[in-house]
Image (tube, grey):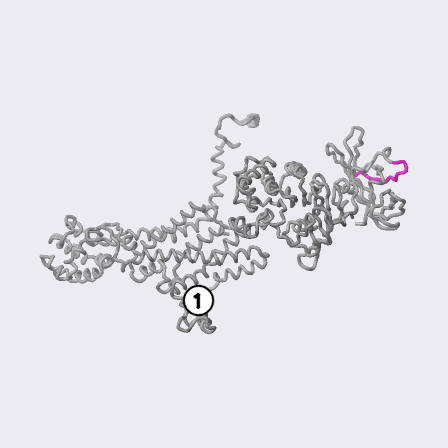
Amino acid sequence: MSQADATQAAPPKREKLFTADGTPLRKALERANRRRKLTALALVGPLLAFILIFFAFPIAQMMWRSVDNPQIVNALPRTLQALDTWDGQGLPNEAVFAALHADMIEDLDRPRREQTIGPLGIRLNYELSAARSAISRTSRAVQNFEAPYSDAFMDAHRLWGQPELWRIIKREGRPLTLSYYVAATDREYDEAGNIVKRPENRQIYVSLFGRTLALSLAITFMTFALGFPIAYFLANMPMRYANLLMIAVLLPFWTSLLVRTSAWIVLLQQQGVINELLVNIGLISDANRISMIYNQTGTIIAMTHILLPFMVLPLYSVMRTIPVSYTRAAKSLGATPWTAFRRVYFPQTLPGIGAGGVLVFIISIGYYITPALVGGQSGRMISNEIARHIQQSLNWGLAAALGTMLLVGVLVLYWLYNRLVGADSLKFG
Amino acid sequence: MSAPEKRDGFVVFDGVQKSYDGETLVVKDLNLSVARGEFLTMLGPSGSGKTTCLMMLAGFETATHGEILLDGRPINSVPPHKRGIGMVFQNYALFPHMTVGENLSFPLEVRGLGKSDREKKIMRALDMVQMGAFANRRPAQLSGGQQQRIALARALVFEPELVLMDEPLGALDKQLREHMQFEITRLAHDLGITTVYVTHDQTEALTMSDNVAVFDDGRIQQLDPPDVLYEAPCNSFVAQFIGENNTLNGIVKEIKGETCIVELDGGEVIDAKPVNVQKVGERTTVSIRPERVEANKSRLDDDAHTIKAEVMEFIYMGDVFRTRLKVAGNENFIMKTRNAPDQVRHKPGDMIEIGWMPTDCRALDHA
């Protein structure tokens, strides 16, 4: 392209452009930007890998575990095939018992690590207590069984004579299951295989979810009610004093959780500082000491304290950016100080309230350690139940189902917030 | 100093003092009277106390001592929202979560006006600033100049008798600023409102105001109409602060009525008008505007003293020539001449003789 051409007015069509040495412009641009892209990738790469391995992957694993159901399929392939024709009424026929015998004999020949009978017993026990002992007792005797196998099995354990066990084996004999979610929503299968509500005395999780939600809302509201005036106070004071006081607000971050919790126990227990004080000054009688710990009150008090900074910080940073001239303008226009606050100042703090609220609510809905330490029975939250299933009852499928429900719940709430308020209005700092 | 002693103005500051820390005074003994319908500008460098005065008048700061009267009533203890003073802020302070219409509706709502009344007044105010089509926009969707107009409309919509403006044009570019200067003065005069305007821009102050109060060091240095202020500054600070100014230092040799003779530090003798000097032998700083310096001897009085000057630099500026001279040791002495056909274009190194009318050269306090 000659100099004269280049200086002419813009070409009518978008022609392919070239650099001075003849390489296509697009290619040259790509090459020039490659280094920058590589640098960017090198900067975010480690964190990205870390998040993928230690955050995204475990969560996916957990969600998979809530529906994964390999135990029965692996242990009893022949039995399941024979059960295919069973109508679910009465006991299955002799062929099914023979197939069960064959499955269990085969399992005995496997190396110990690959044996499937143990996991089978654990899996069936989730659905029917005593199923585990039935399986293990039978498996010890199965080598000596002779036809007719149905009698031999029923002799070994009475459970083999109950149609319920067979219905469970047939229903759960597939690679994916809903049964953990059925259990996590306080429901069960009836004899016809329909999902129905559990008897009232065995319902736990739905009310626990509700309580978790209510406690989280209460804690969010408490942090707002206590944090808003403090943030306002800090935002309207000279910077050097504000920084000093901010340290006091951040103190909960800097003390060990256990130390803080111990402090709460010292303060709040029935023989604690507050109760002793109230009794000594005669406000309450010795018999009517207030229980403020190991119940919901304890959970709310302790978690409000711990989560307060998460409310104060976004509020403070939003309030700092609101110039005093807005309130002044409102007053000069004739608004009383209260009207100026309500109609001009407060609406502008909403991004901070939203950010603080979402932060505190989401953290508290999954909070574990504080409710476990000071919550007692009535202050327990859903995370404590999940932890119990992971550490004590070892029903990881149910724990995963509860965890997935919690995760989805939080995401739905976040989505709702985004629809109603707009996530882009959040200001965290 | 021409501070009025009377208390019969629409806005009166009577012996007002203000201190923030109890150790230094930001405003020292302020006396000021603004007549009804007057456009008064408080002009001064930052930290001179002009904004503090405005804030005291608006009610956001309290006077440490003295009294502020509005229409004859002391307002020291009246809270801002009961003063009924319109105010335009430096950053406009339009409420970002409200539309333009809602912003304008706000002062009417808090006054309890009905919906139809409000709409009528809002439309009138918006039309006044030629923003009638923007009622449903948010402030963030407007340009700086448009926001400025809305801020003005909002300060006027409830028909206050007094409007305060705190450097309202500071954030605009030059062209828009000049346009808005004109519009604000037009509106203020059309509506007959009293305006107190704060700025540090002297051009703004000169072009807009009926009277300008020049602030420095917590005091009003001079309060006069713009032309008096420019042509007859009463002390060195005002002379330096308003417009371009040449200064020469010397000692008063002789005073006879309206003129005096000053011997400069280099020994040269010049004519001047004694303004701030009382007796012979006093040190003085004389001040001459660049456009009043004359190099053409035929335009001067016959007995006028002239003084030698060396041309340092000649700058062609189109409508004027700007010649930098070395006069009595001062290398930054500027002479401004109109670009006329017969005007001489000096070259650096030329030796010329300059002079001036004695009335244009003011002998002021030694700066």
Instruction: Please tell me which residue lies in front, A154 or B218.
Output: B218
The image shows a total of numbered marks equal to 1
Please tell me whether residue B337 is drawn above or below residue B13 in the rendered image: above
Across and down, in percent, residue A296 comes to: 39, 62
- Give the letter of the chain under mark 1: A
- Is residue A222 at all visible to an observer of this figure? yes
Q: Residue at x 57, y 25 (%)?
A: A4
Instruction: Please tell me which residue lies in front, A8 or A196.
Output: A196
Across and down, in percent, residue B322 comes to: 76, 36
Q: Is residue B305 magenta?
A: yes
Q: Residue at x 33, y 58 (%)?
A: A386
Please tell me whether residue B3 is drawn above or below residue B131 in the rendered image: below
Q: Which residues are magenta?
A: B301-312
Across and down, in percent, residue A266 comes to: 44, 70
Amino acid at the residue labelled 1 = Trp
Instruction: Please tell me which residue lies in front, A125 or B206.
Output: B206
Across and down, in percent, residue B195 comes to: 67, 43
- Is residue A113 at all visible to an observer of this figure? no
Q: Is residue A118 magenta?
A: no
Q: Determine the image quadrant of residue B224.
A: top right
Q: Which residue is mark 1?
A: A264
Please tell me whether residue B221 is drawn above or below residue A15 in the rendered image: below
Secondary element at tag 1: helix
